Image (cartoon, rainbow, N blue to C red):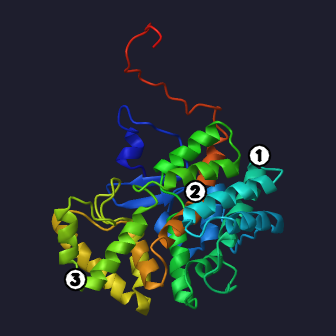
Amino acid sequence: RRSRREAAGPPAGELAVRTALTLIEPETDRYWFRGVDAVELASRYAFEEVAEWLWTGTAAPGARFAAPAELLAAARRAVAAMPEHSGPLDLLRVAVAAAAVADPLRFDLSGEAVLGSARCLIPTLVGALPEAAPEHPGDGRLAWRLWSRLTAREPDPVAVDALDLALALLVDHDLAASTLAVRVAASARAHPYAVVSAGLGALEGPLHGAAGRLAHRMLAEVLERGGAAPVVAEYLRAGRRMPGFGHRLYRGEDPRARALSGRLAELPPAAAALGAAREVAAVMARHGLHPNVDLALAVLTLSSGMTAEAGETVFAVARTAGWIAHALEEYQERPLRMRPSGHYTGRRPPRPLP
C-alpha cells in the first residue's frame, strides 16, 4: 500500500531524492525500512542486523561487527590526543578521520568495498571512545561495547537491550539534515569515511543531534524540582521550546519514542525518569505537542547514569549505518547531481572595483 505522500510525491518546490530506504507515513505515525515496519524490525533484531537489512535488503541473522586492529589503533591514538573538554562528536570526528587514513582501500566505492568499510568503521568508532568501565563482551552485540563507553554502571541485560533498541530505531529517518549532507558528499563521490564526517558535522547543530542533551537536562531538572509544572512554565515564560516534544513528520507521538519508552518500562531503574517524562508529556499535551525520540533517549541516558551528551553518541553511532546506506544509494546516481543553482539577490554587475 502507498501513503498519500508517497503516491503524490513531494510538495511543489521541495527538494526530493529517490530512495528505497525509509518511508515515513505522517497520517499513521509509522515508518518503514525497505517496506518493513521499522519498529517491529528494531524490536525483534539487533542493531547490526537492522543495519544489514537497510544496506542490502537481505536478512542477516546473527550479524556482528568487528574493528580491524589497524583502524582501531589509529582512531584511539587520535582520540587520546584530544583535549579533555572534547565532546563525543569531537571524538567521533577525529576517530573517523584517523580510521580513513589507516584504510588504503577507502577510495574503492564498489558496493562490497563500501559495505566492508561500514562493518569496520562503526565498531571502530565505538572502540575508540574512552571507557567509562571495563568492557563486558555480553553476546557480542555492539550495544554491549557502547554501554561501557557511556556509563560506569554494571551492564544490565535489559538495559543493554534498551540501548540496542535505541540504536536500531535511530538507524535512519529519511532525509534529515545530516543525511542530506551525506547525500551531497556522496554525490561528489567522497569516500565512505568522508561521507560520515559530513554527517557528523551537520549532526552537531542544536536543532539536530544535540536535542537529546537538552531533553536529558530538562528531565533532570524535573526530577530535581519534584514536578513538571514549574519547569514547563519557565521554558514557556522564556519563550524556549520544550526539548523532546513535537516532530514535523508525525501528527501524534513519535513511534520511536513509543517503542523505546515501552521497553524502558521493563527497567526498574528507569521508573523515576520515565515518570517525569510522562508528567511533562501530560502538560505538553494541552499544547498539542507529543513526545519525540529525544525524550525517550533522555530517559534511557538519565536512568542509566550516563551524561547528558550520551544521547548524541547513541544517535551518531546509530545514524552512521543509515548514512552509509544513503551513500550506497547515491553512488549509483549520476555524479554531482546534488548541485542546486543559487538565486542571486545582490546588485547587478558590472560594478566598479572598490
Mark 1 — residue? 110
* Mark 1 and mark 2: Cα distance apart in space: 17 Å
Q: Nearer the viewer, residue 152 or 43?
A: 152
Q: Which mark is residue 227?
A: 3
Q: Nearer the viewer, residue 342 or 253?
A: 342
Mark 1 or mark 3, which has the lower sequence index? 1
Please tell me whether residue 64 is drawn above or below residue 4 in the rendered image: below
Mark 1 or mark 2, which has the lower sequence index? 1
Q: Amino acid at mark 1?
A: Ser
What SS does tag 3 mark? loop
Q: Amino acid at mark 3?
A: Gly
- The spot of residue 337 in percent (x, y) is 58, 31
Q: Amino acid at mark 2?
A: Gly
Please tell me whether residue 175 is drawn above or below residue 120 in the rendered image: above
Left or right of 172, for residue 247: left
Q: Nearer the viewer, residue 316 or 12?
A: 316
Count residues near mark 1 (Cα–Cα under 10 Å), then give few for <14, some for 14-19, many for 20+: few
- The spot of residue 161 in percent (x, y) is 54, 82
- The C terminus lies in quadrant: top left
Q: Which mark is residue 268?
A: none
* Mark 1 and mark 3: Cα distance apart in space: 54 Å
Mark 2 or mark 3, which has the lower sequence index? 3
Mark 2 — residue? 322
Q: Residue at 22% x, 74% y: name it.
A: 231
Kindly tell me whether residue 183 is visible in this rendering.
Answer: yes
Quadrant of the rendered structure where residue 218 is?
Answer: bottom left
Q: Residue at 70% x, 85% y: name it.
A: 137
